[in-house]
Each structure stands twice: as C-alpha cells, then as structure tokens.
Image (cartoon, rainbow, N blue to C red):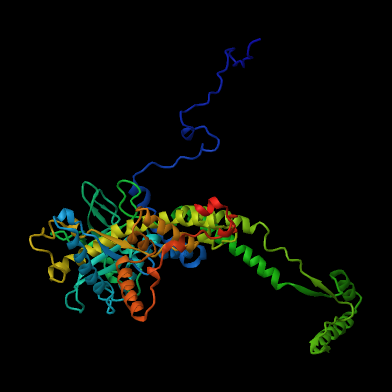
Amino acid sequence: MGVPLIINQDGTPMRRASHQVTAYQAADPASQDMANWWPSLASADYDLLHNRDRITARIRDIARNNGWAAGIVGREIDNVIGGGLRLSVKPDYAALGLDAEWAHEWSKEVEAAWRTYANDPGFYCDASRHSQMGGLFGLAYRHYVVDGDALGVLVWEPNRGGAFATALRVVDPDRLSNPNQGEDTDFLRGGVEIDHNTAAIAYHFRKRHPHDVGTAMDAWIWERIARDTPWGRPQVIHHFDKERDGLSRGVGRLTPILERLKMLDRYDKVELQAAVLNAILAAFIESPFDHNLLQGILEDGQAANLNDYQTARSGFHENKAITLGGIRVPALFPGEKLGFQTVTRPNSSFDAFQATVLRNIAAGTGTSYEQLSKDWSKTNYSSARASLLDMWKTMTYRRDDFAQGFSTPVYLGFLEEAIDKGIVRLPPNAPDFYEARAAYAKCRWIGPGRGWVDPVKEIQAAVLRMAAGISTLEDEVAEQGGDYQEKLQQIMREIKECQAAGIVHPSLRSFATLMVPQQDEREGSQAPGNSSSGEQAA
C-alpha cells in the first residue's frame, strides 16, 4: 500500500515541506531554538567601539555598588599585583656576548637602582606624586579589569626632584578618544592612530576628562602623543586583551557576565527587603471591632460608647506597668487578641539559586566559586587545591601578560635613563643599548605568593622537586612571592648570628624529618608507627 498523497485543487500532488539540512546543526536556519538568532558578523572594532562607553559605564556602576562585582575586581588585583610587582633582572648575556657572572653582578646593580626609583618615598616615579610604582601598577591593572584598557604615559620631569626624570602617569581610558568626538576612520579608531598594519603609532588624549569638575574647557582640547620617540623610547603604554585581529581598544572583564550580575543584584535586594518587612511586622494586637461591627455601632448611634472604649484601651496600654522581678508582664485589654506574623522568608531556594549564578559568574571571570563566594564549607583538601591550582594558572598568565605589556615598557624607559646618566654601567666592548634593548631589558616580574592549602605537604613537595632537579630555589621562592637572592642573603646573616650564639640555624638541619609521612585522617592514611614493614622500608 503506497504513501497517501495530498492533492492540490488542480489534481496534482502537493509538494511536501522540506527541512533544510546543513552539515552543522549550529548553522541550521530552521532550528526551533535558533531560528531567530541572527547575530551580526562585523569587524572587531565595529562590534565594540559603538557600545564600549555604555558597557564601561555599567561595569563601573556595578563595581561601585555590588559586593560580588567589587569582590571580583579586588580579588583579581590582589592575586595578580598584590602589593606590587618585584623586578628580577635577567639580561640575555649569551646574546650580548657576555658571561653569566657579569649578568649576575649587573642584575644586582640594576635592581638596586630600580628599587631606589620605584620605592622613592617622595613618589617621584609617579607623575601625579601619589603612589610608588607598586601602587601605579595596581591602578593601571584596575583600569584594565574594569575598563578594559591600561593606559600610561612616560613623561620627562627633570627639574622637580628625585634621582630620575622618568615618571609614569596612569591615564583614565575615558580621555582616549577621537579629536572633536569624530567618527572612526580607517586610521583613527577610539583615539588610537594606526598604520596600514593596524599597529598603533600615536594616541589622542583629551587634556581633561569630558565630565570633570568645573567648566573643563580643556576637555575639548586633544593632544597627540606618539607611541615612541624617534629613537625608540616608549611614551604611551597601552595594554588590553586583543581578542580579535584589528581590535584597537579593550573591554572590561565583567562584560560577559554583566547581565547575570545585575539580575543577581536585583534578586538579592528583593529577598533582603522581603526578609526585613517580615521581621518588622513580627507581632500585632487585634482589636475586637471588625468593619461590620463598627458600622453597626455607628448606625445605632453608639459612637460615644466606642470613643469611651478606645480611650480606655489607649490609657490602659500607656499606663500598664505590671512587673515581676523587674520584667514587664504582658497584658491585654479586655476583648483584644495577640497575633503573630508568619515569616515566609528567606526563600528556601535562594541559596541554591545564588550558588548556581555565582558558579556561572566565577567561570566567566577565571576565578573559582570558593574564591568568589568565600564559601569553603563543602570543600576538602583535594578540591581546594585543585581549585587553587586552576585559578593560579589563570592569574599567573594574566600577571605575565600585564607585566610584558605594561610593566616592562616602564622598566625600559627607566633603564635607558639609568644607563644614560651612568647610574647603571655597561661593560667595555658591549653592544650599544639601542642596538640590543631586548637583551638588556629582559626581566621577570614576581607577584604575590600563591599560598598554601596544606603547608606541610606542599613544602615536602617543593623539597622533592628541587631534589629531583625539576625545580630550583628561585622558582619555589618566586611562587611564594619572594626573591631567592634576598632570602639567601638574609639566611647567611642569620647563620652567622646563630653560630655566634652557639645554636644551629634551622636551614642547616636535615630535611629528613620533612619527608616522614604524616597521619591524615581525611585520606584514611595510617601513622608511621602503625604501618606495615614494607611501608616503613619505603
């Protein structure tokens, strides 16, 4: 028996509706879930620059007024920058045709000069004379997280004091814009002047913020600053996440999860208001007169009796002072009842819903749910360490990326001046600084320490890594935010003082005690005394 046909009015078979099939379901135009989903396909700058100001304003507002958003921003700055980035000079001595001994001595000389410059109590490294270099890096990174751009200008201030004329000015990204608020063009986008390879060659800054205090006439005057001087000294430092080719400006870290943050913020407020209202109306006194009874009294002309009753009630509640042992005894006027409000808040599903949203937000910002929520109640050692290590990879990458894009150009400007003034000396017959800037300026930036979940286990692991030759003392100390050379010098001084006092410094003791397995009830391990002979031998 054949398949039945549907006939048209003219007697011909009606064509069956066909469903277009594509190789990728993601491109299916007839999908029920994606039929109305037609996002634009535009360049990186076209997608961002028209909407960037609105996105930035919203992120700033929620970072000011929402605790979760403020925590995300502050925690990332703490993990990436902390109190500042420590410079560790690592010149490429092989490329310079020099030896490791020279590199070691020259590094100490440069680092000492950098500390004098960056930690000057007169704040001369800051063009606004407000912060030392650690604070400037933190401010620039905050702009990077919130606004998407970290902008700095290296200015030359030779006559205001301090050992160096080089100073850093961290600039508000709002001041970077096209002159006279002009439209973006092929070679000028969002205040960034580019060449035919889309490389930035100059930046256009308003002299003041467009919404500054006062008349701000300078807000309508733009200054063009070249990216570098003719001889290659950096002048404008611009760091942002270039997520697509051709992107000229950055966008804030909270952009992908901004809508969820706002929805959670509104939900939190509604639940809090409901809980407060229920708490305020906890108990009430019920009068014996309902609306029908009150109407009957008034119709019968007994209003005077009602007034007398209400006056008696009022006087009773004002004057009752029956106490027992100094404690007031509750009493009601005849005919009154005491009622209680049934509390229906907080919502029983609130915690689960909030946790789900926070997990989504944490995933979108590169942190962990535990770090974001500060809720470690359901976390054991293994999951806590896995969470910490995963987040640490992200924060380490962001630190290295920011240091390379922002901190190292600042160091390059400082190093040029230090060599030019003779504060830092180059060896005889060494390449000229401008010929081998990359080799001379090679460095490493050390940030805040990773921290420990279980210090005993992790110190044991560090000792084993060094003993196996897969790590160094420099690596292990840097992971905890320190400089191994400073540690060694301090330990050497302590050893001499301990020897003079006739005691043994802890660093000279055997590490064998660190390798003894410790009882861990969480993992069900046995104490060394209860282990089998085979385990003891191992």
332 horizontally vs 416: left or right = right
Q: Residue sitting at 18 percent across and 59 percent down?
A: 440
Residue lying at the far right of the rendered structure: 300
Q: Nearer the viewer, residue 334 or 249?
A: 249
**Dividing the picture into quarters, in which one does residue 420 lie?**
bottom left
Q: Nearer the viewer, residue 370 or 253?
A: 370
In the rendered image, which quarter contains the N terminus? top right
| Position in image of residue 301 (x %, y %) | 90, 78
| Position in image of residue 356 (x %, y %) | 57, 53
350 horizontally vs 256: left or right = right
| Position in image of residue 500 (x %, y %) | 33, 80
**Dividing the picture into quarters, in which one does residue 486 lie?**
bottom left
Residue lying at the far left of the rendered structure: 429
Q: Is residue 214 visible?
A: no
Q: Determine whether 11 is above or below 517 in the image.
A: above
Q: Nearer the viewer, residue 496 or 363?
A: 496
Counting the numbered discs, the total is 0
Q: Residue sitting at 17 percent across and 78 percent down?
A: 159
Q: Determine whether 298 is above or below 483 in the image.
A: below
Q: Nearer the viewer, residue 455 or 304?
A: 455
Q: Is residue 108 visible?
A: yes
164 horizontally vs 264: left or right = left
| Position in image of residue 70 (x %, y %) | 47, 65
Q: Determine whether 353 is above or below 486 in the image.
A: above
